[in-house]
């Protein structure tokens, strides 16, 4: 996936000290002043501002918030089952604050990884909580129901995040030294996000509806249209052929029903992982990050469905 620069969210590589000049013959002054290679544990310098960087940063924040909800949501469910908190956590105002907490945790981890200062992190955390806190007043007064509280909080959260991002768009990046293992894990964020999206299904394995297979080729076509990557020779024809194939498999599974349909659905998701692998290697149509996330998600869901089929009586 193309690596888009961002403001204040990548660490600035600190230039290494200039080595002293040498008296060895044959070395020019320019050669003697060449800097040493940068420390690989330091990130590249982030260029100056731009709308694209800010949008990319906000997109990363959104993904980090989703990751926080996916990761911490099952933990809240487990805690409520152990300590009998299901009733309390089911109240709309409590659920809203729990959701804001989950999003804030995910956002904080990623912003700190991206070398944002604590003031920016604190203001972004406020953007998570303040919309819900403001709407608690009309909710308590009976002017809003629970659904309006949750929906309104999320809608108000968007301009709040944008305001924080604009306010800190000129924040000076600071150098950050990271362990190689942390850097390697961060680079595999599409894999981590895909695995987080399957947490609930690992707890309760099941088989998805056959109609879900229509999402598999549809995602590639939509992204290809938006990115204008369907114009190469044979690219559009290949995507349309994939669409026809998965639509046909979907219709066969719907007509077959029962255990046969379950196997066809699992096979359809697993086969799409091969489609993702091909696109990841070629880098065509979709970003490599999307192909990686989609491929891992397809394999994980196919494995869960196969497990569910094998553990269910015929």
Image (spheres, rainbow, N blue to C red):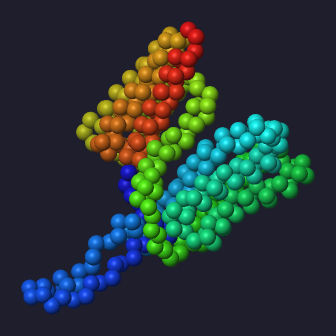
Left or right of residue 15, residue 121 in this image: right
For residue 302, above or below residue 28: above
For residue 268, which quarter of the picture?
top left
Where residue 20 appears, as percent x and y from the top left, is 25, 88
Residue 39 in sight in this render? yes
Q: Residue at x 32, y 36 (%)?
A: 278
Residue 255 in sight in this render? no
Nearest the eye: 126 or 30: 30
Nearest the eye: 180 or 173: 180
For residue 308, above or below residue 83: above
User: How many labels, in total?
Assistant: 0
Left or right of residue 180, residue 55 in this image: right
Left or right of residue 202, residue 26 in this image: left
Q: Residue furthest bottom?
A: 23
Where residue 11 appears, as percent x and y from the top left, is 45, 69
Where residue 260 appears, as percent x and y from the top left, is 49, 12
Where residue 114 appears, as percent x and y from the top left, is 50, 64
Nearest the eye: 145 or 24: 24
For residue 177, which quarter of the picture?
bottom left
Q: Residue at x 76, y 36 (%)?
A: 81
Q: Residue at x 12, y 87 (%)?
A: 24
């Amino acid at each position: 996936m193309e690596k888009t620069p961002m403001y204040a969210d990548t660490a600035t590589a600190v230039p290494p000290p200039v080595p002293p000049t040498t008296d060895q013959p044959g070395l020019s002054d320019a050669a003697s002043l060449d800097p040493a290679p940068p420390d690989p544990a330091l990130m590249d310098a982030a260029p100056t501002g731009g709308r694209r960087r800010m949008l990319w940063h906000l997109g990363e924040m959104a993904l980090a918030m989703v990751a926080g909800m996916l990761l911490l949501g099952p933990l809240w469910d487990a805690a409520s089952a152990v300590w009998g908190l299901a009733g309390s956590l089911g109240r709309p105002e409590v659920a809203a604050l729990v959701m804001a907490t989950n999003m804030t945790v995910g956002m904080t981890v990623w912003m700190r990884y991206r070398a944002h200062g604590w003031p920016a992190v604190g203001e972004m955390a406020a953007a998570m909580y303040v919309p819900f806190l403001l709407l608690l007043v009309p909710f308590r007064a009976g002017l809003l129901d629970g659904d309006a509280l949750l929906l309104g909080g999320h809608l108000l959260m968007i301009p709040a995040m944008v305001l924080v991002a604009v306010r800190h768009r000129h924040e000076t990046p600071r150098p950050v030294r990271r362990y190689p293992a942390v850097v390697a894990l961060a680079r595999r964020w599409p894999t981590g996000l895909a695995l987080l999206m399957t947490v609930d299904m690992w707890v309760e394995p099941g088989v998805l509806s056959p109609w879900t297979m229509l999402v598999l080729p549809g995602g590639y076509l939509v992204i290809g249209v938006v990115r204008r990557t369907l114009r190469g020779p044979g690219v559009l024809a290949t995507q349309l052929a994939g669409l026809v194939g998965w639509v046909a498999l979907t219709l066969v599974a719907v007509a077959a029903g029962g255990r046969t349909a379950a196997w066809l659905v699992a096979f359809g998701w697993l086969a799409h992982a091969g489609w993702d692998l091909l696109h990841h290697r070629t880098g065509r149509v979709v970003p490599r990050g999307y192909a990686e996330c989609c491929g891992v998600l397809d394999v994980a869901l196919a494995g869960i469905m196969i497990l569910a089929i094998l553990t269910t009586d015929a």
